[in-house]
């Protein structure tokens, strides 16, 4: 029996050699085609489990991530990324923070099995900074480095000043390692232990893959190296210092450490009573109602304004017509949940409303100007 197996094995090897020789020396195109098929079949056979016929899993056959980058993404992978915050114009840190869009997060709805998209913004930190009087400080001469945590990472109060470094530190500066003083007098260490820069335990430029980068609100990148006239902003994935204080929904004068302003008469209604609730979700539907009630010939105030009109810094107004980092009493509005379908539908709705005769009106009493709040009391 053993002799039979040896003979059979030698015969199999001899046959394989003859097949290989025949394959390697085809004489016609038809034979070449057949040869290619036989070579492919031979390669498949060599990868079969002799007992079960199942292909063996070899790590070597997995494509390298480098080779998985498509031609369309080659430029991005090579460093030619155009980030969304390159287009927000100039301004101090407080102003630029109000314009920033956080990284886009894609999740699967377990109930519907549909993918949803939403931006992880900075509204919670802005609310905390306003209540602590830090937004006014961030309009100062600087230089400062603001490390701002995304909303999803904030579950309780944060010390806003502890997130501001004295001096300007770019991402390259932080990657070199060292320490810096915060505005509360504490010292934080920064380094680049692997590929991601860290300040304390928080990551800067976290979860960013150049090959997967998308533009605008769909960008997955955490903003970093956001240039400001008095410093720079980096988004981080968790707070540096938390407090036991709740996050305020609206900042008060007492929370800012400043004396309360003298009471003034309520602002005139302008175009009439505000047509939606002031604490509504500030979505396209409610903005459209406010827009339709807006009277450009009457003075702009907290009830009469064009919600689609941007200020001189390119920012959008809250439900009182106030702008982040510029207007007195700005309140971060309740923002709607967003997904891909809603975003695409809103683009079409915006194009439609641009056709409205009032949309492009400028220079009227109801339009934005820097002095629009001069004769108004605090917003409702």
Image (spheres, rainbow, N blue to C red):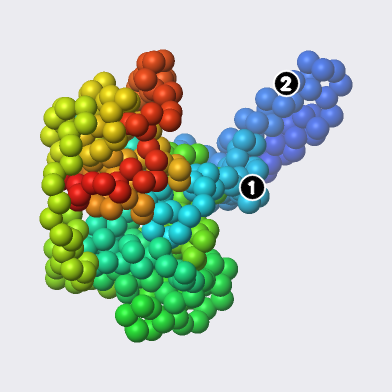
How many marks can you see? 2
Q: Report the front residue among 354 and 121.
A: 354
Residue at image point 50% right, 59% down: 228
Crowd around label 2: few <14 · some 14–19 · many ≥20 (10 Å): some
Percent x, y for residue 246? 14, 63
Above or below for 289 versus 229: above
Residue at image point 29% right, 33% down: 299
Q: Report the front residue among 262 and 255.
A: 262
Percent x, y for residue 112? 22, 29
Q: What element carries label 2?
A: helix
Percent x, y for residue 272? 16, 27
- What residue does disc 2 label? 34
Percent x, y for residue 121? 33, 49
In screen coordinates, is 47 left or right of 125? right
User: Visible in this render: residue 267?
Assistant: yes
Q: Which one is closest to the eye, mark 2 or mark 1?
A: 1
Q: In which quarter of the image is residue 312?
A: top left
In screen coordinates, is 330 left or right of 214? left
Residue 80, which numbered label?
1
């Amino acid at each position: 029996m053993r002799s039979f197996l040896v003979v059979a094995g030698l015969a199999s090897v001899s046959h394989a050699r003859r097949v290989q020789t025949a394959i390697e020396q085809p004489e016609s195109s038809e034979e070449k085609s057949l040869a290619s098929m036989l070579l492919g079949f031979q390669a498949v056979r060599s990868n079969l489990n002799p007992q079960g016929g199942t292909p063996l899993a070899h790590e070597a056959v997995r494509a390298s991530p480098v080779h998985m980058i498509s031609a369309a993404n080659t430029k991005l992978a090579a460093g030619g990324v155009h980030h969304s915050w390159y287009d927000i114009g100039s301004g101090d840190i407080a102003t630029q923070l109000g314009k920033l869009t956080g990284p886009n997060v894609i999740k699967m709805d377990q109930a519907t099995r549909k993918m949803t998209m939403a931006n992880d913004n900075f509204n919670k930190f802005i609310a905390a900074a306003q209540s602590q009087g830090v937004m006014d400080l961030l309009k100062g001469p600087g230089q400062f480095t603001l490390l701002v945590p995304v909303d999803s990472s904030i579950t309780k109060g944060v010390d806003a000043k502890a997130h501001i470094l004295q001096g300007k530190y770019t991402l390259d500066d932080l990657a070199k390692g060292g320490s810096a003083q915060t505005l509360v007098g504490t010292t934080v260490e920064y380094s680049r232990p692997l590929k991601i820069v860290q300040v304390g335990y928080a990551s800067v430029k976290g979860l960013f893959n150049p090959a997967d980068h998308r533009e605008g609100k769909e960008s997955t990148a955490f903003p970093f190296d956001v240039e400001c006239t008095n410093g720079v902003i980096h988004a981080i994935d968790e707070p540096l210092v938390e407090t036991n204080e709740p996050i305020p929904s609206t900042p008060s004068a007492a929370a800012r450490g400043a004396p309360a302003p003298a009471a003034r008469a309520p602002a005139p209604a302008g175009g009439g009573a505000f047509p939606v609730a002031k604490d509504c979700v500030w979505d396209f539907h409610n903005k459209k109602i406010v827009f339709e009630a807006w009277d450009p010939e009457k003075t702009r105030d907290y009830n009469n304004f064009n919600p689609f009109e941007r200020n001189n810094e390119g920012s959008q107004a809250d439900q009182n017509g106030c702008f982040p980092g510029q207007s007195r009493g700005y309140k971060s509005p309740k923002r709607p949940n967003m997904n891909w379908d809603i975003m695409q539908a809103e683009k079409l709705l915006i194009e439609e409303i641009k056709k409205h005769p009032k949309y492009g009106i400028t220079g009227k009493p109801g339009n934005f100007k820097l002095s629009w709040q001069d004769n108004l009391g605090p917003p409702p």
